[in-house]
Amino acid sequence: MDDWRRAIPRTDAVLALPAFTEAAARLGAARVKAAVRAAQELARQGVIAPDAVAAHALAMLDAPAPARAVLNATGVVVHTNLGRAPLSDAAVAALVAASGYTDVELDLATNTRVSRGVRVRALLAQRAGAQASLVVNNGAAALVLVATALGQGRELLISRGELVEIGAGFRLGDLLAATGARLVEVGATNRTRLADYAAAMGPATAAIVKVHPSNYVMSGYVEQASVAELVTLGVPVVHDIGSGLLRPDAALPDEPSASASLAAGADLVIASGDKLLGGPQAGLVVGRRDLIDVLARHPLARAVRVDKLTLAALEATLGAPTPVDAYRLADPALLKERAERIAAAVGAGVVETQGRIGGGGAPDVTLPGWAIALPPDAAARLRTGTPAVLARIDAGRTLIDLRCIDPDDDEAVLVAVQRALAAGAVGEPGMPGEPA
Ligand SMILES: *Cc1c(COP(=O)(O)O)cnc(C)c1O
């Protein structure tokens, strides 16, 4: 290693400096660590001197944050209103490294142009057990591209039980219809059999779109034709699995995975990058190489392409453990210990609580954990403090669930709770409409 690289100070050494421990208590450890990593990366690239790392990181932390960092104490892992998946340290470092000039469309070894994202596309295909993959702006863009490229002026079959509203008034059926494909609704809300699809098929049928109803569960007298059944009909089957599991996960038995769907014969699988996959906002399409080529060459592909930052963060996400996995699989006993420590320090109690996957995924899965129970009026003070802490209100209590908080940030949570309780005790004026 070059000497000047060796001179770059280590992360823990910088974080241990008083200015950084103070900043961590104020802004949250994750943000402070990200600033140090960013400064180290700039030093590695020779943009700043190694001995300027600490000063540069502090300067970044002093700059007003373009978006406010929030400590997520709701227990909801993929929190839509908090930007879905928090990125891994590796993805943050990759974002920083890609922020300057980067080899996004150049093979440096041969000095030849390569198509954008070849590396991450190969990695994604391999992880999903697919022939090929494409990355676009988000899951909705992937659906639009697929529906346009395969279905424009033709017909797409979709079950009446799978006409999902994906959030904030956006309905998947409207999105598909906006592409100029004709949607043919098949079956009944609760039951759609293979025979329903077969009866609706005709010369204009371009594909069958199967959608995982990720944000709701139907139970009772229900039936939906499986991917394995649908592929027997002889038209391309496109499976929108929503949440982005690449491989089956024992902890989420009802979530479809890309590899299982492809193994069952699906021609294309669509998923989001920033839900269970734990990466940046992106739309992932994996499956048959000939169809992926059709999508990649379609004029619309250019309008939904991702930037170099997304590609860098996605590639790093595929190669490292993600906070989403760490948080959803967090050990309840450890969550209890952490909650008890903070609760004891402020004279509060802990209660058992249920976390959620969130992000419109695995709606029937609950994640057993523990929360610090505070009076109801603490929630608004925590939310508007610095760092902002978003708690959950339940049965008249403010609940602080540490599941989605990095243990490095427990100290910042403790300080925030102490402040919120102290402000309550001296009767500081609350938010409008807040209980006194
Ligand atoms: C989330 C979701 C989408 C939309 O994906 P975005 O990445 O939010 O655009 C589409 N289909 C399903 C089934 C989803 O769960």
Image (tube, grey):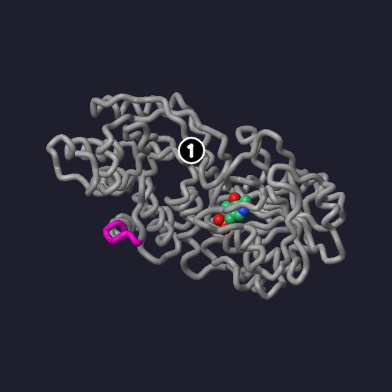
Farthest front residue in view: 188
Judging depth in this view, the residue of 352 and 326 nearest the camera is 352
Residue 59: where, in percent of width, then height? 28, 60
Query: In what quadrant does ligand 1 lie?
Result: bottom right
In the picture, measured across the screen, residue 115 lies left or right of residue 372, that is right
Residue located 33% across and 36% down the image: 410
Residue located 72% across and 72% down the image: 297
Task: Read off the magenta span.
Answer: 60-66
Residue 148: where, in percent of width, then height? 70, 68
Q: Secondary structure at mark 1?
A: helix
Q: Amino acid at mark 1?
A: Tyr
Residue located 66% across and 59% down the image: 121
Residue 189, relative to residue 140: is it above or below?
Answer: above
Is residue 331 shown in magenta? Answer: no
Q: Quadrant of the C terminus?
A: top left
Judging depth in this view, the residue of 409 and 426 nearest the camera is 426
Judging depth in this view, the residue of 224 and 62 nearest the camera is 224
Judging depth in this view, the residue of 423 and 155 nearest the camera is 155
Residue 107, relative to residue 220: is it above or below?
Answer: below
Is residue 64 shown in magenta? Answer: yes
* Residue for badge 1: 327
In the picture, measured across the screen, residue 282 lies left or right of residue 295, that is left
Farthest left residue in view: 426
Camera sees residue 287: no
